[in-house]
Amino acid sequence: MTPATPLLPPAHWRDFLALTKPRVMTLVVFTGLCGMLAAPVGVHPVIGFTAILCIALGAGAAGALNQWYESDIDAVMRRTAKRPLPDGRMDRQAALHFGVGLGAFSVLFMGVAVNLVAAAILTVSILFYVLVYTVWLKRRTPQNIVIGGAAGAFPPLIGWAAATGDVALLPVLLFLFVFLWTPPHFWALALFMKSDYAAAGVPMLPVVSGERTTRTQIGLYTIPMAAVAILPWPLGLTGPIYGIAAVLLTGWFALLAVRVAKRTTHADDAMKPEKALFKYSILYLFVMFGALVVDRWFA
Amino acid sequence: MTPLEPNQADLIRSRQRGRARVMALLLGAFVILIFAVSIAKIRAGMPH
């Protein structure tokens, strides 16, 4: 006889919600919504709502499958140790079934209720996040979030495709913008959470290559990110509202990134500039996409 | 099989009840959404 494994009571429904990473979902939903609102054609409110719901459910499914696969890493990181799986509030099979079911439902519903192009991109984004980022890259290379960042860059493309049934230059630039924004954003976080990542054996850039390299890379990635952020304006894809907002907001981002890039830390450093860059990078993305919608509607 | 302790049985029941309620709400919302999507597509003359 094998020793009996303790039976867990059924997980609380709030734990299933926590499995979907609701805070990450906020950014995904917002960029997806902005991609849809920036499209040149109107979309029926019910169809638009359904598309955004499917994006949110797809992101939730990807988050759940990520937590299912990474529960061993999450258990040793302070930031993630209280998640439902490492905390022992849910069994792994329930999380797997929930993630697969939610992902399949989001894609099928998007295909039936919205259109097949949006459903196809949603499928790619979920598979990319789960298979390419979580399973393949995250534990193997310090470039994990550079390539894996593409997964988080799909929502504006999906939102646009939901409205138009097609893909154009502007949503591709928005995809590139989020893709290039991801490394400085995550590396700023990795700089002040370095010990957590090292304890979990995740090869984030500061753990593998050191702080100096990470700081230089933050500075270097900010250059193409800034160019892509501003590019829609000179290309005539947006008006001056977005253009001026992009120049000012990106300028401030660049200043914070340069400050982080040039710094050398000492023992017991509070890492204030790194935390400031991380916090601002989230606000920056929200305001940039907000400015895009305002520009497309009012300019 | 060992019988469940009263506290554990209560916890399981209350979790099951909570999940059943949330599931009922979600299914109700899904039915309403399907109806609204159908109406929107019919009005727009789009194929189902």
Image (cartoon, coloured by chain):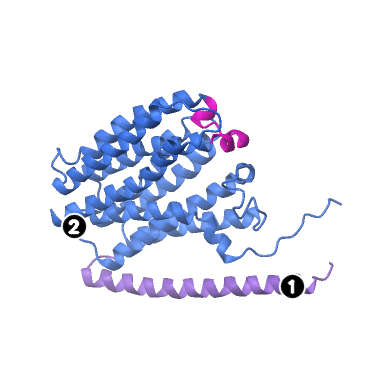
Viewer-proximal residue among A40 and A207: A207
Callout 1: few (<14), some (14-19), or many (20+) C-alpha neighbours within 10 Å?
few
Residue at image coords 44%, 40%: A275
Relative to A96, does residue A263 appear above or below in the rendering?
Answer: above
Residue for badge 1? B9
State how many labels appear. 2
Left or right of A190? Residue B45 is left
The boundaries of the magenta stretch are A194-208
* Residue A76 lies in the magenta stretch: no
> What residue type is disc 1 on?
Ala
Task: Examine the image and state in which quarter residue A88 appears.
Answer: bottom right
Residue at image coords 54%, 58%: A18
Helix, strand or loop for disc 1: helix
Q: Separation of disc 2 and disc 1 at Cα?
A: 55 Å
| Image position, residue A164 (x, y; %) | 23, 54
* Disc 2 versus disc 1: nearer the observer: 1
| Image position, residue A3 (x, y; %) | 83, 52
Can you see residue A141?
no
* Residue A207 lies in the magenta stretch: yes
Badge 2 and badge 1 in a common chain: no
Relative to A29, does residue A70 appear above or below in the rendering?
Answer: above
Query: Which secondary structure type mostly characterizes the magenta part of the structure?
Result: helix
**Chain letter of the purple region:** B
**Chain letter of the blue region:** A
Q: Residue furthest right?
A: A1
Can you see residue A8?
yes
Residue at image coords 26%, 45%: A171
Residue at image coords 53%, 38%: A193
Relative to A22, does residue A231 appear above or below in the rendering?
Answer: above
Helix, strand or loop for disc 2: loop
- Label 2 marks a residue whose chain is A
Residue for badge 2? A41
